[in-house]
Image (cartoon, rainbow, N blue to C red):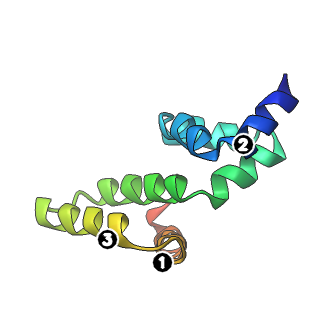
Amino acid sequence: MMDNIEEQMKIFPHITEQIFDYLDIRSLNRCREVRKSWKIFIETSRFSSVKMIKAIVQQLQPSIEIQSQWNRFLLMADNKKIKSVFRWLNKGGFGGI
């Protein structure tokens, strides 16, 4: 069965992203420990970085305007910028997620 899941991840990555995106941060981190291919998929997918950034920003309790600006950035930024911002936020001690 596990091989079947691996094949589905390759054939339907968008569906796999949607499934993982339903999970909270803690569950998503646990999924990274299940299998190397899951870890790679989660860590290289845009949705997981966006989810982590949103969680970090939420911990900072920004104003509605700042939240709106973050959401606009997350919607418009390319994957490279998203990953870079996530690494920066995580390094700055805002992470711990």
Proximity of marks 3 and 2: CB atoms separated by less than 8 Å: no
Q: Position of residue 52 (x, y in %)?
A: 47, 55
x and y, in percent, of residue 46 in the image: 53, 59
Find the distance from the CA under tag 1 to the CA under tag 3. Answer: 9 Å
Q: Provide residue 27's location: percent of width, then percent of height.
A: 58, 34
In the rendered image, the vertical position of residue 4 relative to residue 35, given as above or below: above
Q: Residue sitting at 73 percent across and 49 percent down?
A: 39
> Disc 2 marks which amino acid?
Ile
Residue receiving disc 1: 81
Q: Where, by quadrant of the figure, is residue 76 drawn?
A: bottom left
Q: Nearer the viewer, mark 1 or mark 2?
A: 2
- Is label 1 in contact with label 2 (beta carbons under 8 Å)? no
Residue in the image at 66% along x and 37% along y: 30
Q: Earlier in the sequence, mark 1 or mark 2?
A: 2
Amino acid of disc 1: Lys
Q: Nearer the viewer, residue 35 or 15?
A: 15
- Mark 2 highlights which residue? 11
Mark sitting on residue 73:
3
- Taking the image as shown, residue 30 lies to the left or right of residue 73, namely right
